[in-house]
Amino acid sequence: MLYNINDKLPAKRLVVAALQQVIACFVATILIPQICGVPIAPAMLGAALGTLLYQLFAKGQSPMFISSSGAFVAAVMGALALGAAPNYLAVFIGGIIVCLVYFAVGLAINKCGTAWINKLLPPVVIGPIVAVIGLNLATFIPTYFQINGQYSLIGFGLGMLTLLITALISHYGKGFIKNLPFLVAILIVYAFAAILTVCGIKIIDFSVFNGIKLFQLPDFAFTHFGTWDWTLLPQVLLLFLPLSLVTLCEHTSDHKALSAVIGTDLTQKPGLGYTLMGDGAATALGCLFGAMPNTSYGESVGTTGFSKICSKYVITLAAVIMGIAAFIGPLQAFLISIPSAIFGGCAAVLYGYITLSGIRTIKDSNIDS
């Protein structure tokens, strides 16, 4: 690591490093709410507040970005359809259920230690889980290579160009630019795509800037809460409870992967119990504001690994930027206008990095095959 957890960066480096984290996590942050049919701005704010709350639980010692969880897409869509749809209150109750599960396991870990978790999830299990998470995420990459909602060679080309520039900057870059491969690559390819759009090849939809106000108040989920029907509780439990046990493994895998990247065992400091409780609290908060459960982000792990920057100040500022973007119309429009194909090139690098992290976990554990 060039900058460790408690290291402070110069102001300019801090800002660009935080922007890189935001951009790396942005596509999934807005894509998952879009799939669920909920507004993206409240989900962005929910992710921002969830990350800050997570950092409080982790005492600033776990540089992880928390955002919209793809694992809960089916649960959210199912909860929204219950009773008088869209039932945002049912989603929030589901978030509370997940939070309670995380807190229960987190408190058990704090009381009994992590030995039982390590026995339950040894490296021979964690490594393949991390690798499978990366491979599973990779299946979404082709969906990014679209222009105006359709697959195209131009979209594929933009994605591959982004991947190539990212790789070249990461390997051959000099100075601090070497640690910002995603941000620089996205800006370069965005500029190229803008030129092509001006020349008549429509790639960027500049209409998203029409009628944009400087300040826009998000449509918060809690403003749509109705009267709770207790007869729906069993259905909400069936939707969220089983998935909470699955995402517990995802949380553990992500944090062990990040531990391997930064060289600090986060399951011991700040402790897996505290990170789990922080993740659970972030999920409840995300459901309150944006109707989206939150989770630890492999994209954040990958960005930290490539940039070699794991400062808590970077993650904190990234959360603040994400939260501000939820209110600032032009900034939100710019982020939305970035073609998904460009994000696809970054995703290919990030998801590949996650997969290799899982393989490295197996290798470094000296498992006797």
Image: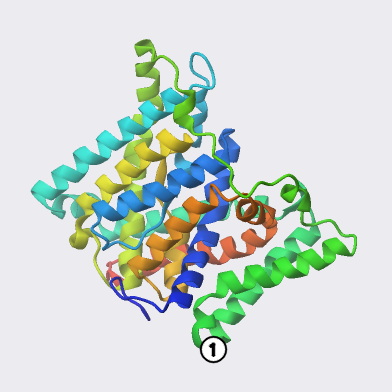
From the viewer's side, name the closer residue of 44 and 117.
Answer: 44
Q: Identify the residue at horizontal 39%, vertical 23% (top origin).
A: 236
Q: Identify the residue at horizontal 59%, vertical 43% (top origin).
A: 216
The N terminus lies in which quarter of the figure?
A: bottom left
From the viewer's side, name the closer residue of 163 and 68.
Answer: 68
Hey, what amino acid is under mark 1?
Lys
Residue 17 coordinates in the image, percent (x, y)? 47, 71
Q: Identify the residue at horizontal 57%, vertical 70% (top origin).
A: 182
SS for callout 1: loop
Q: Left or right: 257 with respect to 111?
A: right
Q: Compared with residue 66, is residue 284 higher up or lower down, i.e. above or below?
A: above
Q: Compared with residue 309, is residue 115 higher up or lower down, i.e. above or below?
A: above
The C terminus lies in which quarter of the figure?
A: bottom left
From the viewer's side, name the closer residue of 100 and 225.
Answer: 225
Q: For residue 361, say whether it is visible.
A: no
Residues packed near mark 1 inside 10 Å, few (<14), some (14 to 19) or many (20 plus): few
Which residue ends up furthest to the front in the rendered image?
214
Q: Compared with residue 316, is residue 110 higher up or lower down, i.e. above or below?
A: above
Which residue in the protein does label 1 denote?
Answer: 174
Which residue ends up furthest to the left in the rendered image?
111
